Image: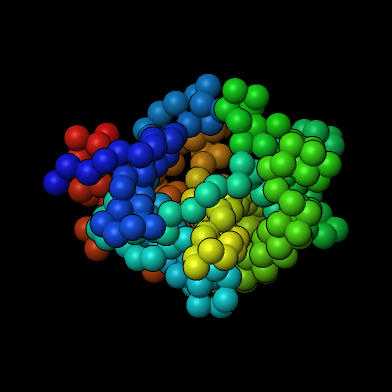
Amino acid sequence: MRRKRLYEGKAKVLFEGPEPGTLVQYFKDDATAFNAEKRGTITGKGVLNNRISEFIMTRLNEVGIPTHFVRRLNMREQLVREVEIVPLEVVVRNVAAGQFAKRFKVDEGTPLPRAIVEYYYKSDELGDPLVTEEHITAFGWAAIQDLDEMVQMALRVNDYLSGLFRGCGLRLVDFKLEFGRLWEDEQMRLVLADEISPDSCRLWDVETGERMDKDRFRRDLGGVEEAYQEVARRLGVLPEAGPVDLKGPKSVQ
């Protein structure tokens, strides 16, 4: 069935939904890093991220953290509410890693004294720069009350996911969230949007410190597909077919 394609990003495609106010979010196997300077394919990533994000978004909805997620439609697609994306990435850091460790010359793996929340402006052209509340409010990307609400939600998500992953033997090092404005009955509320998966989280094995996320792709560590599968297995959402069949339709890929 032909559907209207509304947007294609680095990891997902958005199609017009079956009902007004909905979209179909399709997960691709494409992988990018360093602002798309590095590109590749992680076989089965779209299927696994769809399942993982469905699991997490459902749990967050159940504990009162609103998301755009409605339901999973098939192996690679989920139905989501249409939202106006806030042009910010909200990053929560529990452990020094990646660019944060380099920026402050801190050894990777150093626990932070408390969770640190950072904002990045969503712009591939500018390289998603780190920004402050003053930048955000001056350019009108979000109001102070919006930022307060996003930080509160981000810290609640951090508390919940830290416990969830710890129960699976995984350490939540840091993660990225995106938010959207959902309009209902002429009222606006902020909800979590996009996805939560090994694409957007740093996850290390508690016992070995092994990286179980997209850093394996960024740093050419190998075993990328196996790491994503292991996260899905520990969460109990590995597709019944396992790692076979995980290629998407050629018409979309």
- The answer to whether residue 208 shows anywhere in this view is no
Colour scheme of the rendered structure: rainbow
Estimate the x, y position of residue 140 in percent, counting from the top left.
72, 41
Q: Residue furthest left?
A: 1
Quarter holding the C terminus is top left
Write the residue at 22% across / 49% down: 244
Estimate the x, y position of residue 1 in percent, counting from the top left.
14, 46
Q: Is residue 230 above or below residue 169?
A: above
Question: In the image shown, does 13 or 38 lie closer to the viewer?
Answer: 13
Write the residue at 17% across / 42% down: 2
Write the residue at 43% across / 66% down: 55
**Relative horizontal placement of residue 196, taking residue 248 as reference (left or right):** right
- The answer to whether residue 37 shows anywhere in this view is yes
Estimate the x, y position of residue 46 in percent, counting from the top left.
35, 46
**Relative horizontal placement of residue 87, taking residue 33 as reference (left or right):** right
Q: How many marks?
A: 0
Q: Quadrant of residue 65?
A: bottom right
Question: In the image shown, does 165 or 138 lie closer to the viewer?
Answer: 138
